[in-house]
Structures are given as structure tokens and as C-alpha cells.
Amino acid sequence: MSLTTFFDAVLQDLNINPTPQDVSVLSTMAAGESSGYLLGQNNPLASTQLAPGSFSLPGSAFSSGVNSANVQGYSSQASGEQATAATLANGNYPAILDNLRISAPNSAYAPGTPAAANLMTWQGGSTEDVTNISGQGGGAPQARGVSGQMGGTGGNAATGSNKTTTTSPSSNPFKISFFGASVDFSSFVFIMIGIAILAIGAFALLGANISKGGAVPIPIPV
């Protein structure tokens, strides 16, 4: 089974005349769902739509080790095609369907469009499909594994596992201007402690010199 054959049938189930453009869009979405594995489960778009004979895929198939979204495997190609069509038509992706019906160009999926919002819903907030289809915005495609879509019998609303990255906030977010340089608070404290130690040492030496009757040299202008 090829993606082209699969999505031709999905589009027909949606009463949409299959075109190379529409198949390309759906195939790009499938690439974001690790389609190599899922295609063998008759589910290249990682649908969670329940169907007769469908089964929850094992957690080992997912990078997280858990199939928390209950992504399904389908017993036949026809069953998977029908479940995928039902998922696309479940009411969460009207702009994608509108674009497929008119074989809209890739630019119709660009950031800020209704279809882009639908794609982000599909991917749990990720802009990967938006970027890969439209070629605009969203940054570089994100590395990810199989991702499910939640929604029980109602179909997809992506979990977004492995679709976002987080960064730890700075432990010292406060910045201080010190002689024209910007330093964080902890560095400023260490600098001031060092200056204080040097000052104390200098005064100690000065006091010791005076107590011994030593003269403190004072520069005299010539």
C-alpha cells in the first residue's frame, strides 16, 4: 500500500476528487506522524478514531513509550481509510476540508490562515505541518516521533508529544549596569565583595605602616 493509494481512497470517502496537490498535502501531514510505521497499521495520520476491529497501538511504538492518545491500528486498509476520512470530517478541521475540496495551493496553509490553525490543532500546537506544507514560518521542522490524536470515538485533537521544547529560565534574571557593562546580580555581588576585601586589605596595611611611624608618601606637585 502506498500513501497515494491510501489518500486517494480517503479523499473519495470524503466525496472529494483526488488530485496530486491534495495527496501531497495529506502525505506531508503523514510524514509528520512517522508514516513509515503507521502506514503499516493502516493509519498514516495517527487517527484515534475507533472502528470495528481497531486496536490501540503498543506504547513501544511511541517515542514517549506510552500511547496516551490511544492511537489506533486498523485491521484493513479500507477500515483505516474510512477512519481517517471520519477523523478529518469530525468538525475540528473545516478549513483543511475546504482547501482539499478546491485543491488549494500550499500557500492556503500559510501561517495565519484558518487551515494553518486546523493543522496546529491536529498537531497539538506544533507548527511543523504549517511549515512543511506552506514553506512559511514556524521555524525548522521539529524532530518528533509518532504522535497520537485524542478525542476517543470523535477523532483527532493531537497530544503534541515531542512537538515542543522547553528551556530552563535563567537562575539570575536580574541584570545590573556596572561601569557600562551589564552583569547579573550574583556576579555583581562577587565583584563588590572582592572590592571590599581589597579595600580592607589596603586600610590594614596603611594602619600598620602608620603605627610603626612610617611616612605615608604624599605626591607634591612640582
Image (cartoon, rainbow, N blue to C red):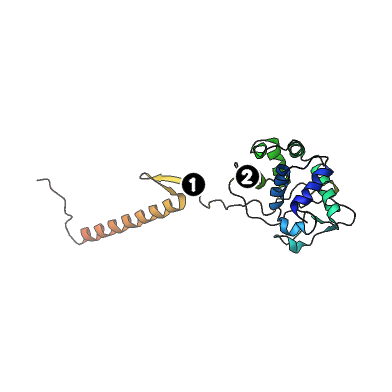
Horizontal and vertical percent position of residue 14: 82, 41
- Number of the label disc, if any, that sits on residue 218: none
Is residue 152 at all visible to an observer of this figure? no
Q: SS of the residue at dot 2?
A: helix
Is residue 163 at all visible to an observer of this figure? yes
Quarter holding the N terminus?
Answer: bottom right
In the rendered image, the vertical position of residue 55 relative to residue 28, given as above or below: below
Q: Look at label 1 and name its amino acid.
A: Phe
Residue name at image x 69 percent, y 52 percent:
31
Residue name at image x 79 percent, y 40 percent:
17
Q: What's the CA distance linking mark 2 and mark 1?
A: 35 Å
Horizontal and vertical percent position of residue 152: 83, 50
- Number of the label disc, if any, that sits on residue 174: 1
Residue at the spot of label 2: 131
Choose between 100 and 158: the one closer to the eye.
100
- Can you name the residue that lies furthest to the right here? 52
Disc 2: CA contacts within 10 A as few (<14), some (14-19) or many (>=20):
many
Q: SS of the residue at dot 1?
A: loop
